[in-house]
């Protein structure tokens, strides 16, 4: 409501006449201002009531083990009346076969060569068919980890009960998890500590979605070399990932580090309200270049809000977090004082 009123007031101060299509009688008179405030208050009230009802509905569905939203997972269909999950006989048989193969020790990469197709559905937004491709090892792994086949639902890091019929028994599911855990080289928390300071900050130049991280290793003789990439793997919005959008992680991170090693970058930060003295730009530049790479990466992960990449892979636009000074400036100022 406050934003709407402020917008109208800014229009009036700028001499702009606003005509509402459904309320042409509302002008700049005091009576019209009062009616606009009342309408804005009702609109805000309605939005809050809708949000409250949605939250109550979700809480009710969770409490009674109901499905919330989204496409039905492989092995199930959505009942046209209740919208709850009901087993798809043909797909359910394949799900059980995948779990049996996993229990025998087959890896997801070995299972994905069965020649089956993933589930296909039609997007409500675009009306286009989605899915129906060949299984990948990542998709097989996600299926094997999904508690929906036990008659439950994943709820963040926990599991909540469901009311749908399970496809896989508990013993088979747990045996499959044990086989997967044996091949995991590190714990989940260790994997998330991989050096990706710009994780979730790079924007795909084609679809404008956030780039994901990707790693793989290659053995050369007795040495194992790890490779890190940022690439488009998101399926947000029901769209497939963009092909060919992949950037070596070190090159992108080094480009950002070099940008902060340039005095003009610090000067731009100062001019946009960092609250620093202009004559300290050189000092801050010198201090930044004197930091080791792990420290720079730790700071990058906190001060960079987003990075928009160009399609030609020649330019990038860095947006820093609004509160970057609260994190960065005290650290660098302290280092600068120590260096004196």
Image: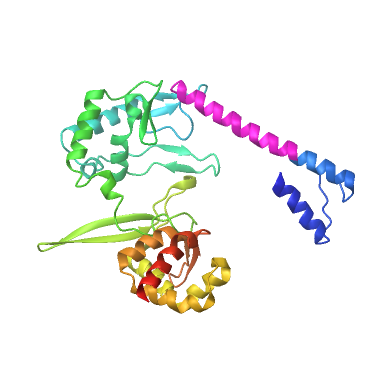
Nearer to us in this view, 23 or 56 = 56
Q: Residue at x 60, y 34 (%)?
A: 51
Left or right: residue 334 versus residue 37 is left
Q: Give coordinates of residue 238: x percent, y percent.
A: 47, 45
Q: Is residue 118 visible to us here?
A: yes
Q: Give coordinates of residue 218: x percent, y percent.
A: 19, 60
Vertical position of residue 211 compared to residue 184: above or below: below
The residues colored magenta run 41-66
Vertical position of residue 223 compared to residue 8: above or below: below
Nearer to us in this view, 262 or 46 = 262
Location of residue 55 by image quarter: top right
Vertical position of residue 110 compared to residue 50: above or below: below
Q: Residue at x 29, y 60 (%)?
A: 228
Q: Give coordinates of residue 309: x percent, y percent.
A: 46, 65
Q: Residue at x 26, y 48 (%)?
A: 190
Main secondary structure along the magenta-highlighted residues: helix
Q: Give coordinates of residue 212: x percent, y percent.
A: 38, 54
Does residue 157 show up magenta in the picture? no
């Amino acid at each position: 409501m406050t934003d709407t009123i402020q917008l109208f007031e800014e229009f009036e101060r700028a001499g702009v006449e606003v005509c509402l299509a459904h309320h042409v009688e509302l002008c700049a008179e005091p009576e019209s201002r009062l009616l606009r405030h009342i309408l804005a208050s009702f609109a805000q009230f309605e939005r809050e009531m809708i949000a409250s009802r949605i939250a109550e509905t979700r809480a009710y569905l969770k409490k009674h083990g109901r499905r919330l939203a989204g496409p039905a997972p492989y092995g199930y269909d959505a009942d046209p009346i209740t919208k709850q999950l009901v087993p798809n006989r043909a797909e359910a048989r394949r799900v059980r076969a995948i779990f049996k193969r996993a229990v025998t020790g087959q890896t997801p990469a070995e299972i994905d060569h069965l020649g089956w197709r993933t589930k296909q559905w039609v997007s409500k937004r675009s009306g286009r068919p989605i899915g129906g491709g060949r299984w990948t090892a990542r998709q097989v792994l996600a299926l094997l980890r999904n508690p929906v086949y036990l008659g439950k639902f994943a709820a963040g890091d926990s599991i909540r009960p469901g009311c749908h019929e399970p496809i896989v028994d508990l013993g088979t599911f747990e045996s499959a998890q044990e086989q997967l855990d044996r091949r995991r080289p590190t714990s989940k928390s260790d994997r998330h500590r991989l050096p990706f300071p710009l994780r979730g900050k790079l924007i795909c130049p084609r679809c404008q979605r956030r780039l994901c991280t990707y790693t793989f290793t290659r053995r050369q003789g007795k040495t194992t070399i790890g490779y890190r990439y940022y690439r488009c793997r998101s399926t947000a919005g029901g769209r497939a990932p963009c092909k060919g959008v992949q950037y070596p992680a070190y090159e992108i991170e080094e480009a950002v580090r070099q940008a902060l090693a340039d005095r003009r970058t610090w000067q731009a930060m100062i001019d946009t309200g960092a609250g620093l003295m202009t004559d300290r730009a050189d000092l801050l530049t010198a201090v930044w270049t004197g930091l080791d790479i792990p420290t720079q990466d730790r700071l990058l992960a906190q001060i960079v809000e987003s990075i928009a990449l160009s399609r030609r892979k020649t330019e990038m636009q860095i947006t820093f977090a609004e509160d970057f000074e609260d994190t960065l400036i005290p650290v660098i100022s302290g280092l600068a004082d120590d260096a004196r």
